[in-house]
Image: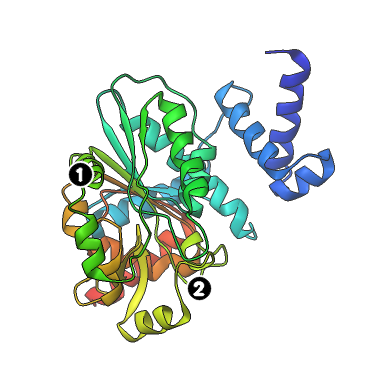
Amino acid sequence: MHRDRRAALAAVAEMYHLDGLSMREIAERRHVSRSTVSRMLTQARERGVVEIAVHHSERRSSEVARTLEEQYGVHAEVVPVATGTSEVDRLEQVALRGAEHVRAVFGSDMTLVIPWGTTVAAVARHLIPRRTTGSRVVQLNGSGNTYSSGIAYASSIIDLFGAAFDASVHHFPVPAFFDDAATRRAMWRERSVQRVLQMQRHADVSLSSVGSLGSEVPGHLYRSGYLERADVERLAEQGVVGDVGSIFLRSDGTTTGIDLNERSSGMPLPQLRRIPRRILVATGHAKVPAVHAALLAHAVTDLIVDHDLAVELTGLRSSRRG
């Protein structure tokens, strides 16, 4: 690596890891974009400029992870995040761990299915390329809405995963939600759609997050014209706390009887549960009810969350048992 480039990476890493500056603050000081800072931090780790040591916070997070594994029967990774960290920087730190985990479990001759969304996009930005052969990346849910096709946004995320693993990419060019459940059923009989659905059903790994209306970093589903006000009100009436891949869940993890799920292009949870490795990445207090619901629904085998969210989950599970 060129000496000047290595020095620049080291300077950015020092400001972030030692001085505790946020990516926004670093970007302002160095007169670059926040996405450039994010890439530089990833490169610093990839090229050995930064080495992660295990400190007390790491050990505490490991203890919480073991508790989550015992309570929910999943593999858990808990990311320690400093007090006062913004939700945006918290997301980036957890997404980095998520990217590392995907890279560890996904390989040649495998199929990865992913939805589009804020968290999955953050994971995509942190992927370190690894060549595979015969692998496929498949879009999990449609992205069209009443304002746009959504294709550009969803494709930008799916394509990053395909490029990182040198995998073939398979888009799902259908609406996120159909106007009528009958239209969805008819569309699902089309051969072009059946081809994508077949790949989804035979996936080896899924990566997703959860959506929540109360999140400080709003999910793309909740801020881009996918849901009308009447839809949101109806979901609240039906006890919905969030979604996984545009399939909505109640606090107890159930999905049946929720009207909008009948019109959703997302993968029904019984099908999702057939995927051997189901990675879920999430951050933030507002995501706790939705993550808990996803865990109760057995939609997760591998959980990656920040320390604060993990602690709330362990307390929620303990209080329910009590």
Q: Amino acid at mark 2?
A: Gly
Q: Height in image: 268 above or below 204? A: below
- Residue 313 visible? The answer is yes
**Upstream in the sequence, badge 1 or badge 2?**
1
Q: Where does label 2 land, which residue?
A: 214
Between 89 and 225, the residue placed more toward the observer is 225
Q: Amino acid at mark 1?
A: Arg
Q: Position of residue 100 (x, y in %)?
A: 44, 35
Q: Height in image: 160 above or below 178? A: above
Q: Height in image: 209 above or below 197? A: below
Q: Position of residue 201 (x, y in %)?
A: 18, 44
Badge 2: residue crowd in 10 Å (few <14, some 14–19, many ≥20): some
- Residue at the image point whose x is 16% and y is 58% from the top: 270
Work out which quarter of the rendered image holds the N terminus and state it.
top right
Q: Where does label 1 land, which residue?
A: 191
Q: Position of residue 141 (x, y in %)?
A: 34, 53
Q: Residue lying furthest top in this view? A: 2
Q: Nearer the viewer, mark 1 or mark 2?
A: 1
- Contact between marks 1 and 2 (CB within 8 A): the answer is no
- Residue at the image point whose x is 21% and y is 54% from the top: 188
- Residue at the image point whose x is 35% and y is 53% from the top: 174
Between 320 and 108, the residue placed more toward the observer is 108
- Residue 251 visible? The answer is no
Q: How is the image coloured?
A: rainbow
Which numbered circle lies on residue 209? none
Between 27 and 264, the residue placed more toward the observer is 264
Work out which quarter of the rendered image holds the C terminus and state it.
bottom left
Element assignment for label 1: helix
